[in-house]
Image (cartoon, coloured by chain):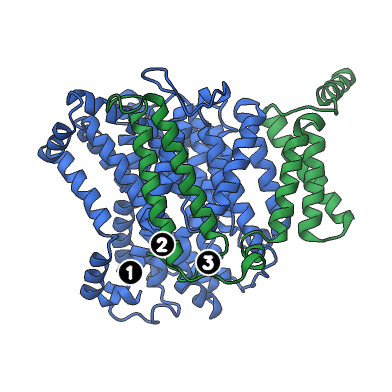
Chain colours: A green, B blue
């Protein structure tokens, strides 16, 4: 069922990494209980990692037989890691790192603002509006309706919500 | 009488009715937007429904599943971009119809045929599942193990580039499923001394990463593809058309149910097989296939929605998901404390009949929403991907975080997202990984039970496998799946059926 005759850039490295990972996992599976019994805790993981070794070896050999893409690093950057993917991944990474310290609201707002602005290459005003509308929608649906607990961070959300609640309770 | 009350539970309770309606409508739009898959939506959603009652969670998920399988056909017809893999075959004749100015007719016909197919699938689910369930009680641990192997192999072989890649992905999922403390002996497996890993890897984080994050990253490759606009009118199909195509719809619905019920296969394969069937049985189409033949639309659309009901059969009766979406739904059922398998129908008949009734309701909503709101729909699918993908990522992060209120699940999700991105790029399927992690426990437990009952003797295990009729059939099926991937078999197939070879 192989559908391509040319190797994709980086394909050998990826397949070799999977093969290496399979070998490592087999070794780790062996460490659980060795070949002590067929019903031991390590028997099934050993069988699975052995299957992974065989399958990844077959895939690796097949990919070695395919014609080289011949475009080197530039082909890899264009087809596998184009700038949009790399930059977006960095945004996600930054978002995950700051989620706890900045809190859901601020970190998510900044993530949406920066990533929509980068991907859409639009005007800042429109991006700002989209980010605010999105974050308000997500917050109302998930935090207030579904009661999903999210990191609070530096914005005292609960105090603000309580103050709003008190205000409306007081006006009754 | 009891069963009947469960059957209509979601019809009579306003909350459940609303959730089913919202789910179906959302499913149609999610399924229609290229890059957003139903599996992605359901996997992100289950983390938000942990705290809900199981019926509420099921109502939403059933609606999304039913609507999503149909939704892909709309963009296949209007833009020639199937919103979901199940709509690939629909694009072959749907888009040519739209180019001729018959987009409305194509959408109307596909909606009604999806409704019809969906109904056939649900009917078979209601009739066949109790029978399969009774039969499944006879299954030995060895048979469960073989069924799980068959499911993984089917996913790997039918939907991927190569069987080796499918097998690798399935085994990887199985291995990931063993991470943590062994449930039988409490020994640590792949924990590397980490306390967090003793609880295992969260299947939900893995699903969100593999289906949601990886797909969003992959879609960034085609960020600025311009949409083609079509004129849409005359949605309601004519009675003569419905009468004419109903027999074909019935045949392809049957194909859909059977393919959907096979562990590991789904609507996409059902639709392609139904398209091929429609081509073979239609002697004189008004318009040639590939140029706007209505039969080419009726076949796949009936089959992919019929496959929904079919996919629930192995999930509810054997605990083995019929496709990727049911793999995610089965994960949700486990989280809600339910144990899908042969005893489910005996212990929780209410859940089974609720599912049947709820799917029927979702199918009716599909017909209503499918034939209305086309103008809003055409606006929504124009939503720029640059806005959509950051939002998907945001929801994925919220979903992963809310599993245990822990950032480590977010890290797992992102890790699997990146892994899934590379896997998809290099032709590996991520479906078998998810199926593997779901089936890992079932396979591990049943392997150990089977081998202990044979006093740890491998020859006795294999002897039992070929002498028990059920095990022998399952074993033979596995051998056939493996053989079907060999060059010799393919050469025989091409020789026997040159038409299929031309595709």
Label 2 to label 1: alpha-carbon separation: 30 Å
Disc 1: which chain? Answer: B
Name which residue lies at 25% across and 71% down: B491
Choose the circle earlier in sequence order: 3 or 1: 3
Give above or below for B293 relative to B67. Answer: below
**Label 3 sits on residue:** B76
User: In which chain is the residue bearing label 3?
Assistant: B
Task: Report the quarter where the N terminus of chain A lies.
Answer: bottom left
- Asked which secondary structure carries label 2, the reply is helix
Q: In the image, residue B475 lies at what x, y percent?
A: 20, 45
| Circle 1: element type | helix
Locate residue B426 relative to residue B114 in the image: left or right. Answer: right
Q: Do the residues labelled 3 and 2 touch (CB within 8 Å)?
A: no
Does B279 appear above or below A113? below
* Marked residue chain, label 2: A
Along the horizontal axis of the image, is A21 left or right of A81? left
Q: Tell me where residue B221 sits by quadrant.
A: bottom right
- Residue B319 pos. (x, y %): 34, 35
Residue B130 disc label: none
A169 versus B173 height, above or below: above
Q: Tell me the crowding category of disc 2: few under 14, some 14 to 19, or many 20 or more residues within 10 angstroms, Cα based.
A: some
Density class for disc 3 (Cα within 10 Å; few <14, some 14-19, many ≥20) is many
**What mark, if any, has residue A62 been given in the picture?**
2
Give the residue pinned by disc 1: B276
Q: Which residue is drawn at 72% across and 29% down?
A: A150
Quick check: B315 above or below A63? above
Same chain under badges 3 and 1? The reply is yes
Structural crowding at the residue carrying mark 1, measured as other residues with C-alpha within 10 Å and reported as few (<14), some (14–19) or many (≥20) = some
Residue B365 visible somewhere in the drawing: no
């Amino acid at each position: 069922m192989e559908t391509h005759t040319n190797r994709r850039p980086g394909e050998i490295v990826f397949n070799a990494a999977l093969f290496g990972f399979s070998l490592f996992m087999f070794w780790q599976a062996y460490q659980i209980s060795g070949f002590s019994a067929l019903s031991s805790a390590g028997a099934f993981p050993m069988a699975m990692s052995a299957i992974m070794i065989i399958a990844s070896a077959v895939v690796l050999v097949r990919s070695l037989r395919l014609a080289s893409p011949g475009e080197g690093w530039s082909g890899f950057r264009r087809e596998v890691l184009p700038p949009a993917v790399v930059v977006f991944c960095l945004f996600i990474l930054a978002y995950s790192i700051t989620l706890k310290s900045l809190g859901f609201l601020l970190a998510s707002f900044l993530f949406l603002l920066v990533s929509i602005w980068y991907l859409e290459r639009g005007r800042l005003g429109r991006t700002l509006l989209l980010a605010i509308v999105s974050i308000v929608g997500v917050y109302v649906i998930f935090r207030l309706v579904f009661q999903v607990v999210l990191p609070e961070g530096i914005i005292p959300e609960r105090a603000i919500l309580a103050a709003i609640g008190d205000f409306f309770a007081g006006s009754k | 009488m009891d069963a009947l009350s469960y059957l209509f539970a979601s019809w009579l309770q306003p909350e459940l009715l609303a959730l089913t309606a919202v789910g179906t409508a959302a499913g149609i739009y999610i399924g229609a937007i290229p890059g957003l898959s139903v599996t992605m939506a359901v996997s992100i959603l289950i983390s938000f429904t942990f705290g809900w009652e199981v019926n509420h969670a099921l109502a939403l998920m059933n609606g999304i599943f039913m609507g999503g399988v149909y939704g892909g056909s709309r963009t296949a017809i209007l833009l020639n971009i199937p919103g979901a893999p199940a709509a690939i075959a629909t694009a072959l004749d749907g888009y040519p119809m739209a180019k001729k100015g018959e987009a409305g007719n194509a959408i109307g016909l596909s909606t009604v045929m999806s409704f019809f197919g969906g109904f056939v699938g649900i009917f078979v689910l209601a009739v066949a599942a109790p029978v399969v369930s009774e039969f499944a009680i006879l299954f030995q641990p060895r048979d469960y193990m073989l069924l799980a192997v068959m499911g993984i192999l089917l996913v790997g072989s039918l939907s991927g580039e190569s069987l080796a890649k499918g097998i690798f992905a399935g085994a990887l999922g199985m291995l990931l499923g063993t991470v943590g403390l062994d449930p039988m002996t409490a020994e640590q497996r792949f924990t590397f001394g980490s306390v967090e890993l003793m609880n295992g890897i969260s299947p939900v984080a893995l699903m969100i990463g593999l289906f949601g994050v990886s797909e969003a990253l992959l879609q960034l490759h085609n960020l600025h593809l311009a949409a083609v606009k079509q004129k849409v009118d005359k949605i309601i199909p004519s009675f003569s058309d419905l009468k004419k195509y109903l027999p074909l719809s019935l045949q392809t619905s049957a194909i859909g149910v059977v393919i959907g019920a096979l562990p590991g296969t789904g609507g996409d394969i059902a639709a392609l097989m139904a398209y091929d069937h429609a081509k073979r049985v239609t002697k004189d189409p008004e318009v040639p296939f590939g140029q706007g033949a209505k039969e080419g639309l009726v076949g796949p659309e009936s089959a992919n929605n019929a496959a929904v009901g079919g996919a629930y059969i192995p999930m509810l009766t054997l605990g083995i998901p019929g496709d990727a979406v049911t793999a995610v739904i089965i994960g949700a059922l486990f989280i809600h404390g339910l144990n899908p398998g042969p005893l489910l129908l005996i212990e929780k008949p209410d859940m089974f009949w609720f599912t049947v009734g709820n799917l029927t309701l979702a199918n009716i909503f599909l017909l209503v929403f499918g034939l209305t709101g086309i103008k809003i729909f055409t606006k929504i699918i124009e939503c720029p991907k640059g806005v959509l993908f950051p939002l998907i990522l945001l929801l994925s992060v919220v979903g992963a975080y809310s599993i245990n209120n822990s950032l480590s699940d977010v890290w797992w999700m992102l890790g699997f997202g990146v892994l899934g991105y590379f896997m998809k790029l290099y032709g590996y399927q991520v479906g078998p990984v998810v199926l593997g992690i779901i089936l890992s426990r079932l396979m591990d437990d049943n392997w150990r039970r089977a081998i202990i009952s044979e006093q740890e003797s491998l020859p006795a295990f294999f002897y039992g496998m070929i002498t028990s009729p059920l095990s022998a059939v399952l074993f033979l099926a596995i051998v056939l799946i493996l053989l079907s991937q060999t060059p010799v078999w393919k050469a025989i197939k091409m020789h026997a059926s040159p038409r299929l070879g031309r595709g």
